[in-house]
Amino acid sequence: MLVRMTALLCLFVAQLAWPAGLPDLIEKMRPGVVGVGTAYPPRQPNVRGDRVVYLGTGFVVGDGHQIVTNAHVIAVELDVNNNQTLAIFSGHGDQATAHVAQVLRRDDEHDLVLLEIQGSVLPVLQLGNSAAVREGQEIAFTGFPIGMALGLYPVTHRGIVSAIVPAAQPSADSSELNNLKITRMRSGFDAFQLDATAYPGNSGSPVFELATGSVVGVVNSVVVKETRETMLSSPSGITYAVPAKYIKALLDRP
């Protein structure tokens, strides 16, 4: 009886202690999470100004000058005649800073792109072992779910890895197939299905382990329950993420 009571007490204390560490972990992760968008230099853009377009989320890796995000996030046509460029937005709130970015490497098969900036080094997030991720594992991701309409204030969502599934989801009919989807079906790589709610703007958000803060994946798609227009009011709560091992391969590629 005493042993059972001791075990229950330890479990209760652990449940109390675990959430207490999450604010510290978020504070640690947040400086390495950045906004991804476009801007018009040379005037220093304000992240709430009309000279900035927000596209998604990214996070800092490598030597502090590299940023990972989804390849589909930067699928925009730049206004090169007026010097519009890709941009990374770092900092927090009114202290946000814009950095001109360029594409260093990309991996369309896994929906990843590596951007590079010049100047000051940004805080780097550490990559974890995505091959060790298990179903039921607790995770969180930090990003900008409704863009930067209210400023550069990242939001964290918590959940679990609910399944490890093929990256190319089944199609209702052949009209939904495209070259990229067929390539993913043939490659057979698995993605993490998350029981956690993501929104437009979360693409490129780092998925990290709660125990270590190590990044094990990148949010890249969300199941839409009704229509894209109702995603904010009727989220599905099902999100997919690309395993971090493909980030490592992209970093190591010459």
Image (tube, helix red, strand yellow):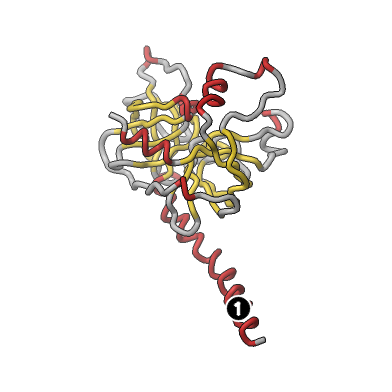
The percent coordinates of residue 215 (x first, y second) are 44, 47
Report x, y in % for residue 44: 35, 31
Quarter of the rendering occupied by the N terminus: bottom right
Rendered image quadrant of residue 114: top left
User: Residue 218's spot in the image, x, y percent?
Assistant: 49, 39
Residue 43 seen by the camera: no
Tell me the element at label 1.
Answer: helix
Task: In the displayed orientation, state which residue is furthest to the left.
Answer: 119
Where is 83 relative to 70, above or below? above
Question: Is residue 173 found left or right of 191 in the rendered image?
Answer: right
Residue drawn where x is 65% and y is 34% of the image: 223
Q: Which residue is mark 1?
A: 7
Q: Does residue 12 lie above or below 200 as drawn?
A: below
Three-letter amino acid code at the position of disc 1: Ala
Quadrant of the rendering where the C terminus is positioned: top left
76 or 99, which lies in front? Answer: 76
Residue at image position (34%, 29%) is 101
- In the rendering, at what x and y percent does residue 3 appear? 61, 84
Count residues near mark 1 (Cα–Cα under 10 Å), then give few for <14, some for 14-19, many for 20+: few
- Counting every numbered tag in the picture gives 1
The furthest residue to the bottom: 2
- Residue ID at (43%, 46%): 92
Left or right of residue 137, residue 79 in this image? left
